[in-house]
Image (cartoon, grey):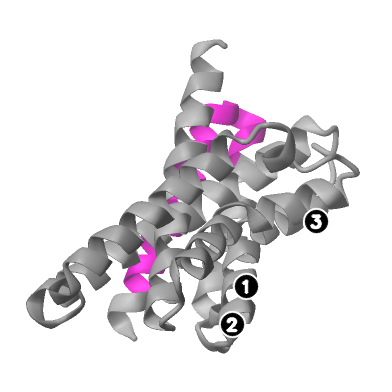
Amino acid sequence: MDIQEIIIFIAELIGTVAFSASGAMVGINRKMDIFGVCVLGVFTAVGGGMVRDIILGNVPNALTDPTYVIAAFLTALIIFTALFIKKELLHGKLRAAYDSMMLVMDALGLGIFTAVGVLTGIRAGYVENTFLLVFLGTLTGVGGGLMRDIMAGVPPYIFVKHIYALASIAGACAFCLIYRFFGEIAALIVSSTLVFVIRLLAENQS
């Protein structure tokens, strides 16, 4: 594994942990048990990528390499356990701080997975099909959250917070453009950062 692959792996792992944490929190807020919280965390983290891989005609990477599933499961398990032991974390100033941290994690995951989705399409041989690449990037970014909300029985976030999907689309478009001039790593960094910033700015103004 060269340095470029290591950077991408670390980015995907960060995104997995971030999305799993957001999924676990939704499950906890819906008063799910430990199994429900862990399932929600895993599906939030890998669901979008699994649908993306199926569209590309591949066995989902999450099923052939369980690293990300394990990371998502452990993240959700740790969060559930911590909040089960210390319920006061869900109230008062600590809850406000935790909500802020979850917002940052969610924005980070959205940016990373959007970029990874586009990169996966490029590596599958569709570098000239910008529409497909943007679709794959957006699907990877918002697909897990969509599954999370449907499974939790709440209105899908992308349908009530439109900027969420728009931020992903903007990041995917930026990746396609930057990739053609500066390569994978530059595109990954710039596009994921763009999504992250748009997501946070939109939330702060809402």
Picture quarter containing residue 89? bottom left
Mark on residue 156?
A: 2
Which residue in the structure is indicated by mark 3?
131
Question: Is 65 colored magenta in this rendering?
Answer: no
Q: Was residue 188 drawn as part of the magenta stretch in this picture?
A: yes
Q: Is residue 104 visible?
A: no
Identity, as a three-letter code, of the amino acid under mark 1: Leu
Question: Circle 1 is placed at which residue position?
Answer: 146
Question: Image point 40% across, 54% down: which residue?
Answer: 77
Assign the magenta stretch its main secondary structure.
helix
Query: Which of marks 1 and 2 precedes in the sequence?
Result: 1
Circle 1: is it few (<14), some (14-19), or many (20+) Cα within 10 Å?
many
**Front in this rendered view, residue 38 or 206:** 38
Left or right of residue 32, residue 134 in this image: right
Q: Nearer the viewer, mark 3 or mark 2?
A: 2
Query: How far is mark 3 from mark 2, CA to CA?
Result: 24 Å
In this view of the protein, can residue 106 be seen by the observer?
yes
Element on which disc 3 rests: helix
Q: Which contiguous range is marked in magenta?
A: 178-202
The secondary element bearing badge 1 is classed as helix
Q: Nearer the viewer, residue 87 or 60?
A: 87
Q: Are marks 2 and 1 in contact (CB under 8 Å)?
A: yes
Give left or right: position of 127 versus 160.
Answer: right
Furthest residue in direction top, as rendered: 2
| Direction from residue 18 to residue 1 in the image, left or right | right
Q: Specify the label residue 28 is tagged with.
A: none
Going from N to C along the chain, the mark reached first, 3 or 1, is 3
Which amino acid, mark 2?
Answer: Pro
What residue type is disc 3 on? Phe
Counting from the top left corner in percent of width and height, residue 205 is at: 30, 82
How many angstroms separate mark 3 from mark 1 (CA)? 21 Å
Q: Residue at x 56, y 80 (%)?
A: 152
